[in-house]
Amino acid sequence: QVQLVESGGGLVQAGDSLRLSCAGSDRTFSAYTIGWFRQTPQKERESVAEINWSGDSTDYADSVKGRFTISRDNAKNTVYLQMNSLKPEDTAVYYCAADPSRTGTKYIYWGQGTQVTVSS
């Protein structure tokens, strides 16, 4: 099974940018739909963005549209989440997940998460 490793989180100020990376352990990663999710102790996990296997179809939560961009480099088995104009409400643990069914509904492989903290 593919293993996912997130990186790129950190502590930033409101208005700053961060780029998260999700690295897959093998080439099967390039065939999967990949999603980014986030969770805080106060909220249920929410979907942030997803990208299909080829990278030509993406979807975003309304709360991040226009600020976040998901992309992928299948040659590097990596998906990115570029986060601009960060807000304190973006503070969460961010997870990437892989959906082998490519439907965007069956995320079965998950990374360990990376913390993003946005201070005001």
Image: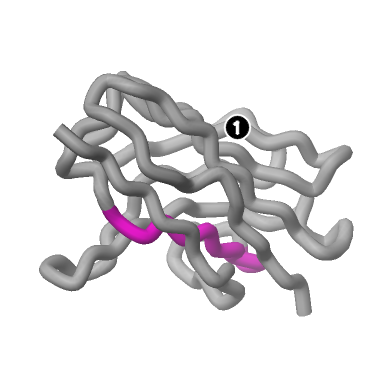
Residue depicted at 41% across the width and 56% down the height: 115
The residue closer to the viewer here, 13 or 70, is 13
Quadrant occupied by the N terminus: bottom right
Residue at image coords 16%, 43%: 89
Q: Amino acid at mark 1?
A: Ser
Our reading of the magenta stretch's main secondary structure is strand
Q: Nearer the viewer, residue 91 or 71?
A: 91
Quarter location, residue 57: top right
Across and down, in percent, residue 84 comes to: 37, 23
Query: Residue 62 appears at what percent x and percent y?
Result: 21, 35
Q: Is residue 115 above or below residue 2?
A: above
From the viewer's perspective, tell me whether residue 73 is left or right of residue 80. right
Q: Which residue is mark 1?
A: 71
User: Which quadrant of the figure has residue 90?
Assistant: top left
Q: Residue at x 23, y 27 (%)?
A: 14
Quick one: quadrant of the C terminus?
top left
The vertical placement of 2 against 79, above or below, is below
**Type of colouring:** one colour
The residue nearer to you, when weighing 117 against 95, is 117
Report if residue 59 lies within the magenta region. no
Position of 111 compared to 85: left or right?
A: right
**SS class of the residue under badge 1?**
strand
Classify 10 Å Cα crowding around label 1: few (below 14), some (14-19), many (20 and above): many
Q: Over which residues does the magenta segment extend?
A: 92-101
